[in-house]
Amino acid sequence: MAATKAEAQIVLKEVEKLYAPYIEAMETKPELMQGDVWNGGDTWTVCWEEGPYEWAGVFPAAVSVMGDGYQDYPEDHLLHWEQIQKRLRHYGMWTEAFRNYQLGVYRTSEV
């Protein structure tokens, strides 16, 4: 089930926190949009074409359709991912990589 806009904003904030140094250095940030970049739809997504390489495929709770990019990230970054996964599960949400720069946000249960 697709998440609401308010729920997707929680994921957007988590992405912004995790990648804050990158956002500050590059002066670009992810944005919330409804639907897939190419196909539209009702699913709320976090889109960030200028983000780190394949960021969406390795974001916490993401099921990567683009391959495994974990080797590109430092070990302490993985610890942050685990913490984010716990917070997303608390809200009953999970994410899926639509593209290597776009993350779909879904609900696992009624919250």
Image (cartoon, helix red, strand yellow):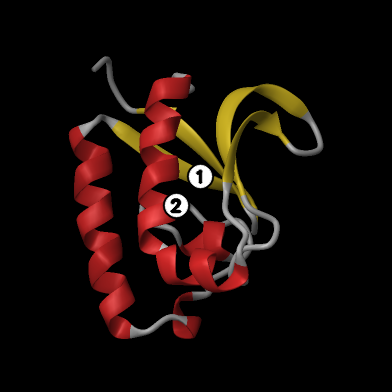
Amino acid found under the numbered disc labelled 1: Glu
Q: Which labelled disc corresponds to residue 66?
A: none
Q: Is residue 6 visible?
A: yes
Residue 3 seen in this snapshot: no
Q: Is residue 63 left or right of residue 47?
A: left
Circle 2 sits on which residue? 62
Residue tagged 1: 96
Examine the image and state in which quarter residue 75 appears.
bottom left
Of the numbered discs 1 and 2, the one sitting upstream in the chain is: 2
Q: Is residue 7 above or below residue 103?
A: above
Quarter of the figure that contains the N terminus: top left
Name the element at disc 1: strand
In which quadrant of the rendered view does residue 90 lie? Answer: top left
Q: Residue at x 24, y 31 (%)?
A: 91
Mark 1 vs 2: CB contact within 8 A: yes
* Count of number-bearing discs: 2
Q: CA distance from mark 1 to mark 2?
A: 5 Å
At mark 2, the secondary structure is loop
Residue at 43% x, 71% y: name it: 21
Residue 12 spot, x, y in % from top left? 45, 42
Q: Quadrant of the C terminus?
A: top left
Residue 87: x, y in percent? 21, 44
Image height of 23 relative to 46, above or below: below
From the viewer's perspective, is 61 left or right of 32?
A: left
Are there few (<14), some (14-19), or many (20+) residues within 10 Å of tag 1? many
Residue displayed at 52% across by 64% down: 23
Residue shown at 67% from the left, 28% from the top? 35
Q: Residue furthest top?
A: 110
